[in-house]
Image: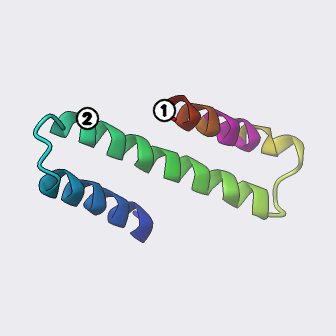
Amino acid sequence: MSKFAIVAIVGMLALAATSGVAALEWSILFQRSLQALISLVLLGTSLIVFVSKNYAHTDRNWAYGTVGALIGFWLHFA
């Protein structure tokens, strides 16, 4: 797990603990944290495929699709 993911999860937990908002359920916090973690893993693997010269242009299609799906997924929440 990357340092950024750990910091993001700890930050969200600290925010939930100190904000005083009792309506924030732990299940929602866990769901958002897991969504962010999976997104970071998929984005990381896609970026490795983009940067690496070992993959042909046609082999990179799944990486382009993954990044597009992640952008659409997170814009859905905005």
Apparent side of residue 15 relative to residue 63 in the rendered image (left or right): left
- Indicate the quadrant where residue 61 lies: top right
Could you say which disc has been placed on residue 30 in the image? none
Position of residue 66 measured from the top left corner of the image (x, y, whole percent): 66, 38
Q: Secondary structure at mark 1?
A: helix
Q: Earlier in the sequence, mark 1 or mark 2?
A: 2
Position of residue 41 measured from the top left corner of the image (x, y, whole percent): 51, 52
The amino acid type found where label 2 is placed reads: Ile
Position of residue 1 measured from the top left corner of the image (x, y, whole percent): 39, 63
| Residue visible at 84% across and 63% down in the picture | 53
Mark nearer the viewer, 1 or 2? 1
Position of residue 58 measured from the top left corner of the image (x, y, whole percent): 87, 41
The amino acid type found where label 1 is placed reads: Phe
Which residue is disc 1 drawn over? Answer: 77
| Residue visible at 81% across and 43% down in the picture | 59
Residue sitting farthest toward the bottom: 3
Residue sitting farthest toward the top: 76
From this viewpoint, is residue 52 visible?
A: yes
- Indicate the quadrant where residue 38 lies: top left
| Residue visible at 77% across and 56% down in the picture | 50
Q: Which sits in the foreground, 63 or 69?
A: 69
Q: CA distance from mark 1 to mark 2?
A: 13 Å
Which residue is disc 2 drawn over? Answer: 28
Apparent side of residue 42 relative to residue 56 in the rendered image (left or right): left
From this viewpoint, is residue 2 visible?
A: no
Dominant secondary structure of the magenta stretch? helix
Q: Secondary structure at mark 2?
A: helix
Tell me if residue 73 comes above or below residue 11 in the rendering. above
Which residues are drawn in magenta?
Answer: 63-69
| Residue visible at 36% across and 60% down in the picture | 8
